[in-house]
Image: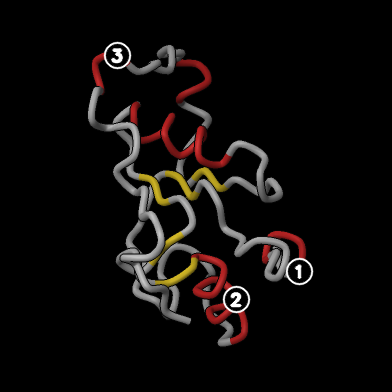
């Protein structure tokens, strides 16, 4: 389902206006060598996904919050459609999602919790 982007805030660039003042992750080579993107937040709605999205963007990583497919479709709808089509849910789903380092919110609120229903 497409989203009217003008009526919804598309915050894919949140946290990049003042990149010098934002928190930076510490470089820990032992941990960094083991952790590889994508990082997918499986948390429930209202559990800090905006802060998580801003954190990754601030650190220079690609990130989407809840809108995927060029900011026109809910990530949850893209993931669900891919799963039902026997495709990989991330990143190359039926919604032409770009490969991201972080998917900060993959649900569509209580009505579509793909992280519970499918993943």
Query: Dot 3, crowdedness within 10 Å: few (<14), some or many (≥20)?
Result: few
Tell me the CA gap for discs 1 and 2.
Answer: 9 Å
Provide the residue designation for mark 3: 21
SS assignment at label 2 = helix
Residue at 24% across, 23% down: 18
Please identify the residue farthest to the front as the structure is shown: 7
Location of residue 96 with respect to 20 vertically, above or below: below
Q: Position of residue 92 (x, y in %)?
A: 40, 70
Q: Specify which label sits upstream in the sequence, 3 or 1.
A: 3
Given residues 81 and 13, the one toward you in this image is 13
Location of residue 88 with respect to 55 vertically, above or below: below
CB atoms of marks 1 and 2 within 8 Å: yes
Residue at 46% across, 24% down: 32
Q: Specify which label sits upstream in the sequence, 1 or 2.
A: 2
Q: Specify which label sits upstream in the sequence, 2 or 3.
A: 3
Provide the residue designation for mark 1: 117
Could you tell me how many numbered marks the image carries? 3
Given residues 21 and 116, the one toward you in this image is 21
Residue at 52% across, 43% down: 39
Residue at 45% across, 39% down: 53
Provide the residue designation for mark 2: 80
Tell me the CA gap for discs 2 and 3.
Answer: 37 Å
Please identify the residue farthest to the bottom as the structure is shown: 85
SS assignment at label 3 = helix
CB atoms of marks 2 and 3 within 8 Å: no
Location of residue 93 with respect to 58 vertically, above or below: below
Query: Dot 1, crowdedness within 10 Å: few (<14), some or many (≥20)?
Result: few
Asked whether, in this view, residue 57 is left or right of residue 86, the answer is: left
Tell me the CA gap for discs 3 and 1.
Answer: 38 Å
Q: Quadrant of residue 57?
A: top left
């Amino acid at each position: 389902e497409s989203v009217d982007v003008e009526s919804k805030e598309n915050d894919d660039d949140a946290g990049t206006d003042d990149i010098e003042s934002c928190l930076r992750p510490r470089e820990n080579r032992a941990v960094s060598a083991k952790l590889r993107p994508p990082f997918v937040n499986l948390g429930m709605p209202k559990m800090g996904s905006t802060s998580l999205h801003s954190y990754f963007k601030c650190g220079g990583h690609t990130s989407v919050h809840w809108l995927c497919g060029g900011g026109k479709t809910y990530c949850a709808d893209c993931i669900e459609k891919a799963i039902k089509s026997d495709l990989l849910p991330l990143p190359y789903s039926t919604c032409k999602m770009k490969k991201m380092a972080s998917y900060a919110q993959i649900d569509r609120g209580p009505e579509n919790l793909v992280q519970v229903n499918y993943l």
